[in-house]
Amino acid sequence: MSTITPAESAARELGAGFSGELIGPEDPTYDEARALFNAMIDKRPSVIARCATPEDVVSVIAFARAHDLPLAITGGGHNGGGLGSVDDGVVADLGPLGSIAVDPEARTVRVGGGCTWREVDTATHEHGLAVPCGVISTTGVGGLTLGGGIGHLTRGCGLTIDNLVAAEVVLADGERVTASADENEELFWALRGGGGNFGVVTEFTFRAHPVSDVVGGPTFWPIEQTDELLAAYR
């Protein structure tokens, strides 16, 4: 007697309209696909849906709702608590949403929900620009932004979330909306520190700042320069 695997069931239901990749426990790439940055956390989702388009995200949310399955969203997969995965549920992996478009004149950058900060820095640095972000290049853009985002540029340029201009969001009912200071303002407010679970952000638009060299790390000074050093630091 043949059995239908979770990934096969999802593939049949999502149909040809799903352009991403579906991975289940029976697939040879399953262990690699479910791995998280924090190796102490070991979760086994029923289906991992690698979403290639925002429409794929809409389809996966509808599938999880229809089957009353827990749904987790992963961007860079860097979350220390492992919140980008779930046991016996569905993971919407935004990794394939990796587009980055820099507008050097407007000093903005549009970033796919699956990007890491290394990728963003590489793209903006070509134009002498940077978005305030964290201090580890493998951190995902989505998790850091929606959690606030503290890094080397924070003192001069604010938190990452202070530099969020707009977000493309898929809501729990599958509706796709834009959140900004001028559109869906309350959702925009909520995304910037409201605690999460307001939707899946498939694209971020950030304000970028002119940046050349950044000097960081521990520095050592003669004790005789304490007054001068603390005055400058303050």
Image: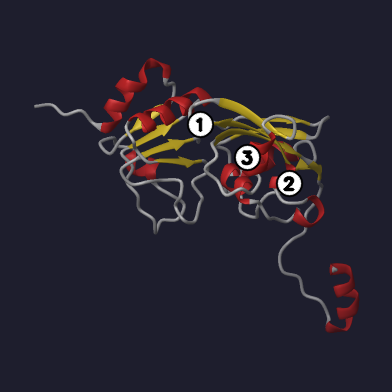
Q: Position of residue 115 (x, y in %)?
A: 58, 38
Residue farthest along the top direction in this orientation? 16
N-terminal of the pair, mark 2 or mark 3, is 3
Q: Amino acid at mark 3?
A: Glu
The residue where tag 2 is placed is: 162
**Label 2 SS:** helix
177 to 159, vertically: above or below: above
168 to 89, vertically: above or below: above
Residues packed near mark 1 inside 10 Å, few (<14), some (14 to 19) or many (20 plus): some
Query: In front: 74, or 126?
Result: 74
**Depth-wise, is mark 2 or mark 3 nearer the camera?**
2
The residue where tag 3 is placed is: 119
**Depth-wise, is mark 1 or mark 3 nearer the camera?**
1
**Label 3 SS:** helix
User: Which quadrant holds residue 231?
Assistant: bottom right
Q: Is residue 24 toward the left or the right of residue 166 in the image?
A: left
Query: In front: 213, or 80?
Result: 80
Query: Do the numbered discs 1 and 2 sit on residues whose CB atoms are within 8 Å?
Result: no
